[in-house]
Image: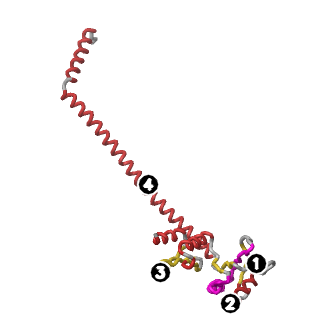
């Protein structure tokens, strides 16, 4: 059925009047407002719950990643420590001797044998020394000597008698790898030289009447915490 223009106008007027009546009805407006608020609130709750689930999931992932990272860091430190221990073990037959004046065309094996006999009262056979030579920069005071013994027993015999060199200007040390040497020097600075020594490639520190073994910077850091 086709409406006439007059009928259309009547319908529009009726709708307009109805809207005006409804808009002037406070209860109706409150009902609409309550319904809209309810819909918005429901949507917000749904969105919040979805985000909460996502956030909790992300938190769990972050926590898992942190644990994995901590595990990897520890594993890496353990591997580094094992590598250092292996490197240090390969040097267990070596010592370094400081303070011996360097001479032209010298034979360091014979220089050491003379030192062992005259200062340490040790008769070491030349065949007990695998090899020896000067290392480091020549500063005019004489480069130090590094010596590798055939057996750990002979090396340790010499090392155990090094205290007899006190006051001579000559010192004997273990051949420490770079990282452990750094820890050794730092420990000496923190706890004084008389409280720090090495044995079989390990660094020992005496503190508060206790003896601590220091294998790494981490071990030293933990000990330093006890002093603070």
Q: Position of residue 216 (x, y in %)?
A: 55, 70
Label 1 neighbour load within 10 Å: few <14, some 14-19, many 20+: some
Identity of the residue furthest to the front in this view: 167
Residue holding disc 3: 209
Residue holding disc 2: 122
Q: Position of residue 52 (x, y in %)?
A: 35, 47
Q: Is residue 173 left or right of residue 187?
A: right
Q: Vertical placement of 40 versus 104: above or below?
A: above
Between discs 4 and 3, the one toward the N terminus: 4
Residue holding disc 4: 62
Between discs 3 and 1, the one toward the N terminus: 1
Between discs 4 and 2, the one toward the N terminus: 4
Task: Please name the colour scheme applied to the rendered image.
Answer: secondary structure
Can you tell which of label 1 and label 2 is closer to the viewer? 1
Residue holding disc 1: 102
Res. 189 visible in picture: yes
CA separation in Å, label 1 and label 2: 22 Å
Q: Position of residue 83 (x, y in %)?
A: 59, 70
Secondary structure type for disc 3: loop
Residue in the foreground of this view, choosing between 108 and 63 = 108
CA separation in Å, label 4 and label 2: 63 Å
Res. 127 visible in picture: no
Q: Magenta span has 52?
A: no
Q: Vertical placement of 196 versus 22: above or below?
A: below
Residue in the foreground of this view, choosing between 150 and 143 = 143
Can you tell which of label 1 and label 4 is closer to the viewer? 1
Between discs 1 and 2, the one toward the N terminus: 1
Residue interval drawn in magenta: 140-168
């Amino acid at each position: 059925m086709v409406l006439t223009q007059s009928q259309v106008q009547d319908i529009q007027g009726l709708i307009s009047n109805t809207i005006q009546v409804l808009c002037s009805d406070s209860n109706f407006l409150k009902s609409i407002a309550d319904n809209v608020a309810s819909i918005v609130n429901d949507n917000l709750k749904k969105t919040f719950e979805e985000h909460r689930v996502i956030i909790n999931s992300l938190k769990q992932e972050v926590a898992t990643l942190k644990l994995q990272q901590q595990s990897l860091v520890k594993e890496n430190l353990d591997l580094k420590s094992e590598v250092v221990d292996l490197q240090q073990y390969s040097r267990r037959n070596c010592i370094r001797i400081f303070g011996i004046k360097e001479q032209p065309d010298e034979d360091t094996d014979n220089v050491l044998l003379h030192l062992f006999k005259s200062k340490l009262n040790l008769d070491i056979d030349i065949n007990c020394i695998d090899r020896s030579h000067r290392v480091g920069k020549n500063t005019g005071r004489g480069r130090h000597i590094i010596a590798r013994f055939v057996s750990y027993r002979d090396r340790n015999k010499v090392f155990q008698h090094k205290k007899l060199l006190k006051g001579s200007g000559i010192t004997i040390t273990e051949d420490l790898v770079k990282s452990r040497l750094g820890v050794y020097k730092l420990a000496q600075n923190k706890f004084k030289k008389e409280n720090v020594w090495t044995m079989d490639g390990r660094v020992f520190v005496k503190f508060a009447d206790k003896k601590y073994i220091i294998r790494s910077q981490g071990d030293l850091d933990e000990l330093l915490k006890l002093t603070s």
